[in-house]
Image: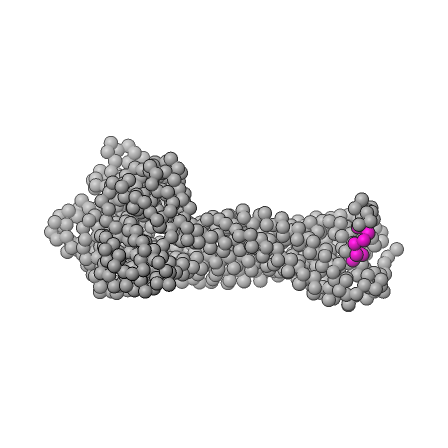
Amino acid sequence: MVKVLRRKVVSEIRTSYLQYLSVILIAMLAVTLFTGIYANYKNFDDRLKHIYDITHMSDITITFQGYDEQDEEFLKSNHISYEKRIYLTGKSGTTNVNIIVFDENTQMCLPTQLSKENISTHDVLVDQNFLNRKELNIGDSVEVEVRSITFQATITGTMIHPEALDNSSYSTGLIYLGIDVLKDIGGSLIETLIPLLYNQYIIQTKNPSKTLKEIQNYYDQKETSNLLYAALRSDMPTNVSIESDVIQAKKMLYVFPVIFYLVAVLIILTSISQLINKEKMNIGIMKSFGYTKKEIMIHYMSIIILLCIIGSIFGMILGPLIIPKVMSTKYHYLYQLPKYHVTFFRFEYLISVFILILVSMFTSFIACKNEINKKPIESLRGENSVQMKGNIIEQTKLFQKIPLTIRMALRNMRRKISRTLMVVLGLIGCSSLLVCGFGIDNTLNYGLDLELNELISYDLSIGYLNSGSHKEELQKIDGITKIEEYEKIAITLQKDKIISSSLFLLPETSEVFTPNYQQEGVLLSEKVAEEIGAKVGDEINIVMNNQTYQEKVSSIVSLCITQGVFVSQEKMNLPFSPNATWIKTSDSKLNSTIQTQIENINGIESVITIQEMKQRLDSVTSSIRVMTTTVKVFAILLAIVVLYNLALLNFEERTRDIATLKVLGFNRIEIGMSLTFEILTSTLIGSLVGLLFGYPLLVTVLSINENPLVTYIYHIYPSTYLYTILLTCGVSIVMNSIFSFLTKRIRMVESLKSVD
């Protein structure tokens, strides 16, 4: 008997291959998303861990002010593996830089991918990104200012350092400086003071959280603490961005795959229900021949399981091949990491297959249980119609005037209410994904337009090579109507967390920067406020030039690109030495000409027009836009599968209705309208409801896919909702047009035969 049932499985799949194709497709989509997103997370995580391993990256960093031998004794007595080093912050022109001084004993936080075979304590290494930004080459001198002291050093090579993986043009540069270079710069005085310059411990430990707690307890108990901060690797300003991206990549597993798995349940349930409906008589015959309920149940469950396995195999191949490749565009742009390699199989991929099989077994059991429990005679008799009482609406004269084809469509929707509900739920998922995909584009465009056209409105942005005003030279250029100089200072912000940021010292009044920063206290950008856990009224610590300032947060502003602390120069009572300016021109067409003239002024490091700024930001957000395209493509594919499944079910179930309409003289177009009306109505309902879930899904997706260079100001344009409705309804019409064309193949005599 078992062999007979096995042969029957193959036979049924062959005869109903169109119906089962939808099950294979949805299984493939669900597994593709899960395996693809998981592969993206693991590949990213593995590439980061590889960098950390080969460079011996530290687990904890302690930064202090003033070397204390007692601190080092504490580390030794607790058998904590550590190194002490000199870590300085400064500027090279308008570029913020961190300087790590290394010696011959340095074994932690080493550079990799060096441009030279061996490095010595006479070397000065930078990353290629720093060279490109400064337009320098190996062998050139770089000028650096640290604590009001300016010095020059000759660049001897390039590297990738685990504390400078950020590849963006906005990142803080890193200079890896040999201790002998520092001695040569400062002479005998610096050589004498070097033991007092050490201001960091970097630590490796098997239990970072426990060790960090012990260190914090030690400093809390000291009478006079010299601690500035102690942080895990993942909380360090130099690594927090890439570490958070790894976490965000993993969180993506809990968004899109969940939606597709839910829709997969609906499609499997409708497919198996249709199968059982068509197999009622065969089930009765199998019972009569002595097959047990268990054997019959396993027979039909095995069909669905087989289809899910086929779809899963395709999904496990396509997912790791496509999605990590798409997402690696973002990581390549943002970070310096080893090349991406495709890993086609990971054990975790089987989790998605296992979940899908469990789902298919459960839904198959639910669909089969009722029919299998019937007596053989009940199954053999079959059901030719469903007795339905007419409701009040159907008895009205207005309803009777509706064309017969439309009334039959309405009757079928009411008759198959469970299937209609499943289609509506499936379309809710599709339309919410489409709104999310279009909404990501809307959010990016809205944020950029809001900042560059309203909040900070300028035509050119200029960076000075050194601090000091260039207003007089700029005023001599024709076409410039407004010059607004400001000073941008590298700072460290501290409240709940410690982050590196920028302080913008602005003039008392501004025609360019419109948010209100003249209040008592300081103005924070929203992203910075969220990162340190600050809100209006909180006190925050601003550390710059080794001085700590405690300021109150007066207000918070939503900015897309420019991030930091904004305050008037009079409020901070600091010496004002501008290093940048915003310029307005009389005509944007003159921007390029004015840009050329400004670049010829001595002391100007960079000039960017508003047009170039927008192009740069488009390149920054290109990876996010790639993700939106992926979301939209999968949403449309999901809509196609759902509507294909429904259209096929509807067509097969209504062969008797179609034959009746053909006998009554209705043509193919009129019959097609009946099929289209039913599907289109369900599509429209599902799409409209799905619009409500689009915004929450948008916030969820972007919140776990944050970009350190851009702050999302969530916004969805009305046109997005219109496009979503048109797309889902358009797919619905196309699917039904295909099946409407097949109505001519239906033979009236055979379709109208029934079992009495």
Residue 305 placement: quadrant: bottom right
Q: Which residue of the protein is positioned furthest toward the left in this rendering?
A: 188
Compared to 642, does 540 lie above or below? Answer: above
Residue in the picture at 56% in, 50% down = 694
Q: Report the span colored magenta.
A: 399-405
Please tell me whether residue 358 belongs to the stretch shown in magenta. no
Quarter of image, res 205: top left
Look at the image and name its color scheme.
one colour
Position of the N terminus by quadrant = bottom right
Up-down relation of residue 187 to residue 71 (above or below) = below
In the image, what residue occupies the spot 46% across and 55% down? 445
> 40 or 497, which lies in front?
497
Farthest residue, direction bottom: 745
Q: How many marks?
A: 0
- The quadrant the C terminus occupies is bottom right
Q: Taking the image as drawn, is residue 611 in sight?
A: yes
The image quarter in which residue 334 lies:
bottom left
Residue 749 or 380: which is nearer the viewer? Answer: 749
Q: Residue at x 56, y 55 (%)?
A: 719
Left or right: 183 in relation to 94: left
Residue 682: percent from the left, percent from the top?
68, 53
* Observer-nearest of 475 and 545: 475
Q: Determine if residue 246 is in view.
A: no
Q: Position of residue 644 (x, y in %)?
A: 67, 60
Left or right: residue 131 versus residue 121 is right
Give the residue drawn at x 81%, y 47%. Answer: 396
Q: Position of residue 21 (x, y in %)?
A: 66, 62
Could you say where residue 272 lies in the image, as x and y percent from the top left?
Answer: 70, 54
